[in-house]
Image (tube, grey):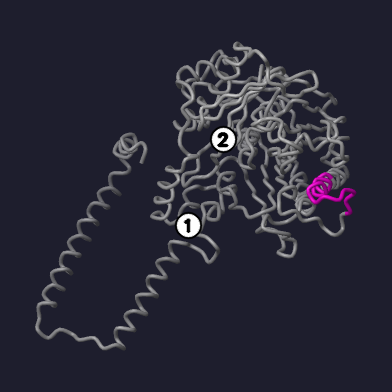
Amino acid sequence: MDYAGPTLGMITGEKSYYFPIFFFILSSVVFAYLCHVIRIKFQKSLKKKDLIIYSHKSQLSILGCSALLIGLCLFGIRGRMGYNPIKISAAYYCNNAFLNQLGLNPAFYLLQSSLDALRPENQTVHLINESIALSNTKRYLAIEHPLTKISPIAHLVEAKGKPVKANVVIVLMESMSANLMQTFGQQKRLTPFLDSLYHESLSFNHFFSSGIHTNHGLYSTLYSFPAMMKRNLMKGAVIPNYSGLPTILKENGYRNLFFMTHESQYDNMNAFFRTNGYDEIYSQENYPSSKVANSFGVQDDYLFDFALPVLNRKAATKKPFFATLLTVSNHPPYVIPPYFHPKNSKPEDQIVEYADWSIKKFMDGAKKQPWFNNTIFVFVADHGKMVGEADCEMPQSYNHIPLIIYSKLLHKEQKDCIGGQVDIAPTLLGLLNISYTRNSFGIDLLKEKRSCMFFTSDNMIGCKDSSHFYFYCPESKQEFFYEINKNGKLVQPATVDIKSKSFLKNYCFSMLQSAEYLVKKGLTKTK
């Protein structure tokens, strides 16, 4: 509906469409003629003197039949017996978009997509002029030779030598703020395994989530596009195509698997991931009902227990696999299984202990498998959470998260460079030595450098370097600027560093406006 002219041009410009268009017009004319004939016939019947007088019994039968037919029509619109109409993800059962969409009600989703477009969070952002934003983004990301036929920021990343055919496992940990780990100053012992793994891995001290919701973390980690405040960019009646880690690995012979604890249609995950590179989706529908703990499905340790045999079967095919596992236990309502015995008393602390224990159990199991030594494990939070008291109007604990890359193929090292979830895919592709076309906002943190990192919350846009933190509220047009002292604490400066503030503002505004441009124009893929 937004691009009526170009859409009409695509339809009329394709000769193979002419016959269906002609058939549609012909059937419409015939249908209109038949309606006209029937209308005339009923008008003549009504003019007769001997009108039929209906009894109460016949009127009740007509009412009953009408109610039944109306009910069937409503059921057809809903499409299922569940608590809501059939969602797009529930209709997706294969990797053919056309076959999947045959199960959807077109009238319902035309209305749904129109209403979605009117939601405040789905309105396009206007932070800076688009051409200026794109020019700045190319400079900030050091893009010298863009492939303009694909997009203004697309460019070729060429690797030297042969690719490393290692398996990749990404564990996205629910709400695992860096502030929950002793490595980052937590006083309580909540994550003993993650803390130990952090020091045995390629780890990043200054790493940030793109947003504060799970869909933001998945979207940015896997496809290297930034979060847009409240917006869920994986939802929508039309599933957009993205080029990212799943699609690139698939092109290089990988089998891609996604494991989640809850229903596959949650946040439109099933439809979005099947459209964008994943071969197999495992969700609550695949697990026994006895294992479902709450509205978010099964618990973390069962998710890992279920995934391990599946990964063993994939490894047995001698083809590399890419697996993504999304945990959920560290999200209310908290359920502590009776077989786990926490050391802390508060439920919000106990659940973090349990999440850490589940990851340890998974890694202990993985170490026994023949594919372990040839696998790169990535542990990263989908986003953070409020830990302790807010340190400013945009609390850092929501976005500051750990990134741990563990493998027998890598040397352990703690990196002080600044980075974010959009950088995970390029960094992994660099470790795998794969050449590809990059059409996104990430960099390889081991070969390139960021001067600062940008991220969002529901109502704020932030940007941070090693010395300053700038954030902005588009609704109120308020700006905030803090300095970071030697202890990593935020302090309001007596005199604002105008140059640093201006740079951070232009950096985050340019990145988000460029991302908005690519999404709006449908320039999010490379093929």
Q: Judging from the image, what secondary structure is the residue with disc 1 in?
A: loop
Neighbour class for label 2 at 10 Å: few (<14), some, many (≥20)? some
Quadrant of the image occupied by residue 467? top right
Q: Which mark is residue 103?
A: 1
Q: Are marks 1 and 2 in contact (CB under 8 Å)?
A: no
Q: Examine the rendering and report whether any part of residue 167 can be seen.
A: no
| In front of the other: 305 or 98 | 305
- 183 sits left or right of 331 in the view: right
- The main secondary structure of the magenta stretch is helix
Q: Nearer the viewer, residue 501 or 279?
A: 501
Is residue 276 shown in magenta? no
Identify the residue at horizontal 75%, vertical 32% (top origin): 403
Q: Quadrant of residue 396?
A: top right
The residue closer to the viewer here, 122 or 45, is 122
**Tag 2, which secondary structure?**
loop
Pointer 1 local density, CA inside 10 Å: few below 14, some 14–19, many at least 20: some
Is 351 inside the magenta-drawn segment? yes
Residue that numbered label 2 is attached to = 459
- Closer to the N terminus: mark 1 or mark 2? 1
Which region of the structure is painted magenta?
341-356
Image location (x, y in percent) of residue 283: 66, 54
Residue 253, quarter of the rendered image: top right
Dot 2 amino acid type: Asn
Please provide percent x and percent y for residue 21.
Answer: 28, 47
- Could you give the CA–CA distance between mark 1 and mark 2, rounded to whole angstroms? 36 Å
Mark 1 or 2: the one toward you = 2
Is residue 174 rendered to the left or right of residue 239? right
Residue flagged by tag 1: what amino acid is it?
Gly
Residue 191 visible here: yes
x and y, in percent, of residue 174 in the image? 72, 44
Is residue 371 found left or right of 31 in the rendered image? Answer: right
Q: Position of residue 121 (x, y in %)?
A: 50, 39
